[in-house]
Amino acid sequence: MSEGARHANSRPQGSRIDPYFDQYAERARGMVASEIRALFAVTARPEIVSLAGGSPYVSALPLDVVGNMAGQLIAERGSVALQYCTAQGDAGLREKICEVMSLEGIRAHPDDVVVTVGSQQALDLITRIFVDPGDVVLAEAPSYVGALGSFSAYQADVVHVAMDDDGLIPEALEEAIQRLTAAGRRIKFLYTVPNHQNPAGVTLLTQRRPRILEICQAAGLLIIEDNPYGLLGFDGDPIRALRADDAEGVVYLGTFSKTFAPGVRVGWAAAPPGIRDKLVLAAESAVLCHSSFSQLVVGDYLATQPWREQVKDFRELYRQRRDAMLDALTAQMPDGCRWTTPAGGFYVWLQLPEGINSKAMLPQAVSSRVAYVPGTGFYADGGGAGHLRLSYCFPPPDRIREGVRRLASVIEAEIDLRATFGAMAPSGRTGPETPGPGDL
Ligand SMILES: Cc1ncc(COP(=O)(O)O)c(C=O)c1O
C-alpha cells in the first residue's frame, strides 16, 4: 500500500480543517475560542489602543528586586525550588495565604488551603469535582469569561442570575433557585465575583451579603466566591469576604495575579475539608503538583518585600486610570450610553444605545484603532450584545483617553447609520454572517 493510501484509510475523516473533529469527547464540543482570546492577536498591534484585555500593569513592580530575589532563591534553595512538591502546595505559602485572607476577615488554617495554577485552575478543579453534564451552575449575568469556559468544558448548564449596580440581586437568586428546584434540576453551586466584578465593575452591596448567604444556606447551595480584585478597592478597607461569615458554605478563590504577577500562576482555593480533599486529588491528577519555584518566589516576595505598599501603589495607579476612563467617557460618549462606576478592579461595563450590537461593531472599532470586548463573551445564553467591557488596567491615562475618543466616534457613526438606515443598519445584524473577532 502506498504511503498516501495508508494515510487516507487510517486517518479520521472529521473535516478538512481538523480530521479529528468527529473523534473529540462530547465535552470538547463546548470548547470554543472566547471573544477575548480571538482578540489578543489583533489588540497586540501597537497602533491599536486596547481597552480589551485585563492584563495587570506588572511593569509597576520592582522588577530588578524580584529578579534578584528569584536568583537568590535558586542559588540558596534550588534543590527545593526545582523539585516536586505536594499537590496541596507549599506549607509556608499556605500560611502566608491565610494572612492575606485575614485582610478580608477570613480566619482560615493553612490546611484549608489548596494552592492552584492561578484561580483559573481552581475554577476548573471545582467544576470537575462537582459538575456532571447537564447540572445547573448559577452564575451572575454577566460573568467572568474564564469561569464560563470551565463550566462549558464540563457541560454545565449555566443559568444566569441578574445583577444591578449593587451586584447580585437576592430576589433574582431566590427566584432562580425556586424555579429550578421546582423543575427538578440539580443546582451544583452559585458562582459569584462579589468585588469589582469582571466584567461589570460592580461590587455586591454589604447589606445584600447576609441575605445571599441566607438564601444559599436555606437551599443547601454551595457558593464559589471568586475574589481576584478584593484588595484592589480604591476607597477604604477591603470588604469582608462572604467566606468570613460562612466557612462551611463558601469556597473562596484567591490569586496573586493582580496583587503581584499573573506570570507566576499562583492562586488558591480555601474550602471546607471534604471539598479540600477532593481538590487535592483532582490537582494531583491534573498536574501532580504545582510549580515549587513559583510558590517559593511568591512566598519570598510576601516575606521579604513590602507587598502591602506595592498593593497600595497598584491601587493608586489603577485609580488614576479609572478616573481617566470615567472622565473621558463623560466627556465623549454620545447620548444613550450608560456605564458603571467601578470602586476598584480593572473594568467598566458600557451599555450601548438601543439597537447597537457590540460584536457587530467590533471590526469598525478595530479599523478605528480601538479594541474592547463585546458583551456576548460574558453570557452563556447569547445575551450581552448591547454591552461591552472596557479595561483601564494596562494603557496609560493618555492612551485611555485616546481610546475612549476613538470608541465614541465609532458609536456615533453607528448611531448615524441607524438613523439613516433604521434596523437594516449593520449593527442590527445578528446570526452567523455577523463578523466576529475571530474573523479579523
Ligand atoms: C474574576 C476572575 N477570576 C479568575 C481569574 C483568573 O485569574 P488567574 O488564573 O490569573 O488567577 C480572573 C482573571 O482575570 C478573573 O478576572
Image: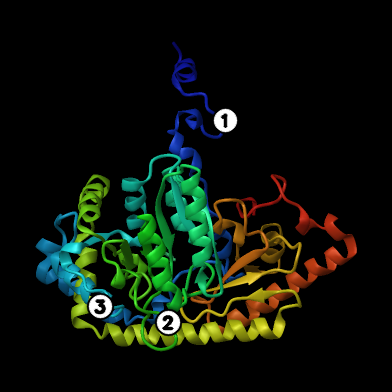
The structure residue drawn at horizontal position 70% and vertical position 57%, both measured from the top left corner, is 360
Q: Residues within 10 Å of mark 2 (few under 14, many from 20)?
A: many
Q: Between marks 1 and 2, how big is the CA–CA gap?
A: 50 Å
Residue 181 visible? yes
The structure residue drawn at horizontal position 34% and vertical position 78%, both measured from the top left corner, is 240
Image position, residue 58 (x, y; %): 39, 75
Q: Amino acid at mark 2?
A: Gly
The answer to which image quadrant residue 423 occupies is bottom right
The image quadrant where one finds ligand 1 is: bottom left
Residue 47 visible? no
Q: Amino acid at mark 1?
A: Arg
Give the quarter of the figure containing the C terminus. Answer: bottom right
Out of 48 and 268, give the one closest to the viewer. 268
Q: Would residue 92 be found to the left or right of residue 13 on screen?
A: left
Image position, residue 205 (x, y; %): 47, 77
Of circles 3 and 2, which is in front? 3
Q: Would residue 135 be found to the left or right of residue 141 on screen?
A: left
- Tag 2's secondary structure? loop
Q: Residues within 10 Å of mark 1 (few under 14, many from 20)?
A: few
Q: Residues within 10 Å of mark 3 (few under 14, many from 20)?
A: some
Of circles 1 and 2, which is in front? 2
Residue 203, placed above or below residue 3? below
Give the residue number, with chain letter if any, for mark 2.
Answer: 233
Q: Amino acid at mark 3?
A: Ser
Give the residue number, with chain letter if any, for mark 1.
Answer: 16
Out of 290 and 167, give the one closest to the viewer. 167
- Tag 1's secondary structure? loop
Give the residue number, with chain letter if any, for mark 3.
Answer: 102
Image position, residue 204 (x, y; %): 46, 73
Give the quarter of the figure containing the N terminus. Answer: top left
Image position, residue 418 (x, y; %): 84, 63
- Of the numbered discs 1 and 3, the one sitting upstream in the chain is 1
